Image (cartoon, rainbow, N blue to C red):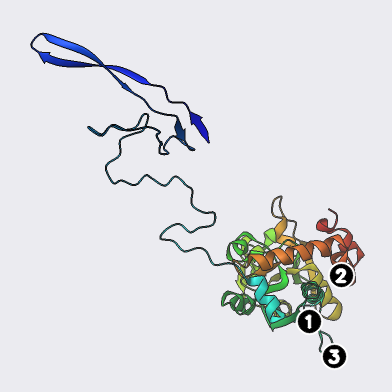
Amino acid sequence: MTLFSGRCLRRSIKIRKGKGESNEAEETRTCGPLSCTGPLSGRLRHKGKIPRSPPRPACGSPSEPSGSTPPDTNPPATGSAVPGTEAPAADDSLQKVLDAGKLTIAAEGNWVPYVYNEDGTGELTGFEVDIAKEICSRLGVEPDFQISSSWDPVEAGMDSGRYDCIICGVNPKPERQEKYNMSIAYAENPFCLVVAGDNEEITSFADLAGRSCANALNSTAGDLARKAGAELSDASLTAAMDLIVSGRADATVNNVAAVEEYMKERPDMNVKIAAIYEPEEGEEWIIQSAVAFQKGADTLTEKVNEILQEMIDDGTCYDLTVQYFGQSVADSTSIYQK
């Protein structure tokens, strides 16, 4: 509190007694010490009497109408809502998952080596499945996998709020970042262009202009084909390969690892990799994989980000990449080199 010492104010008042006559009287008003708190808009308190008639304002203070209430100069309490508005609801996405004891995960199946059922046992396995299981283990909950036969139903189910997240090699493209909460990247999956084994006309992505391409319509692979000028027809990888071999489609775009695995299991299929997609500078996200969460699920996203960073730092993601894709792929994955 800052104190200001009041001084006697002396002023002359002309008192007219008659025509041509005037006496000069001296009026003295004395104010005691002034106490001002905070900004000068605070009220001033006085020691001593204030003249009754006519009432005058105290020294240094503005006049106030009778009965007026001085303005409240105290700031509102921290966190208090602005009048007429409602405070935003607290995000309890992480607590809901912990309370439920499970994380509901959407994924596209029949996608070797990412998400697929093991021959003989039917057990769900793959790189993305193992990533999801490890996340859940560190969260202390069980994975609840919801598998669809193609990509579009996965995204539709997520949009309807049926799933907590998608773990299925999801590219964090700008449109998805607007639509969902996206985690940090935990893997890299380059894309390739596949054509019939005897096709010599399509040797690069630029050659797709005006060609038919079999791809999931809302996938990043489909986006790449569309960007190159291809005409898309909706198909999974297996269906796309059949369409190419039968001559009903010119090409397909998919992950290199998925295509190589398919060709290894089906050596009789007359298909080949014509080109590998090279992302332009600033478009590295095209080959990255991240987890997609419901928009606004911030506490869940932040916790999973912590877990994914731990998995990258302790070598878990690297080891899983070696297991499913080989040493050379793991060593060339840039996010594991930081």
Q: Is residue 189 visible?
A: no
Q: Earlier in the sequence, mark 1 or mark 3?
A: 1
Q: Point out residue 124 in the picture as x, y percentages from the top left corner.
A: 79, 84
Residue shown at 65% from the left, 74% from the top: 216
Amino acid marked by disc 3: Thr
Q: Earlier in the sequence, mark 2 or mark 1?
A: 1
Q: Point out residue 227 in the picture as x, y percentages from the top left corner.
A: 62, 61
| Residue found at the far left of this picture | 19
Residue 320's tag is 2
| Residue found at the far bottom of this picture | 120
Q: Residues within 10 Å of mark 1 (few under 14, many from 20)?
A: many
| Residue found at the far right of this picture | 327
Residue 116's tag is 1
Left or right, 49 with respect to 35, comes to left
Provide the secondary structure element on which disc 1 rests.
strand
Provide the secondary structure element on which disc 2 rests.
helix
Amino acid marked by disc 2: Leu
Left or right, 189 with respect to 64, comes to right
Q: Are marks 1 and 3 in contact (CB under 8 Å)?
A: no
Q: Point out residue 191 in the picture as x, y percentages from the top left corner.
A: 75, 64
Q: Point out residue 179 in the picture as x, y percentages from the top left corner.
A: 58, 65
Q: Closer to the camera, 133 or 114? A: 133
Residue shown at 22% from the left, 12% from the top: 24
Q: Is residue 33 visible?
A: yes
Residue shown at 78% from the left, 65% from the top: 308
Q: Residues within 10 Å of mark 2 (few under 14, many from 20)?
A: some
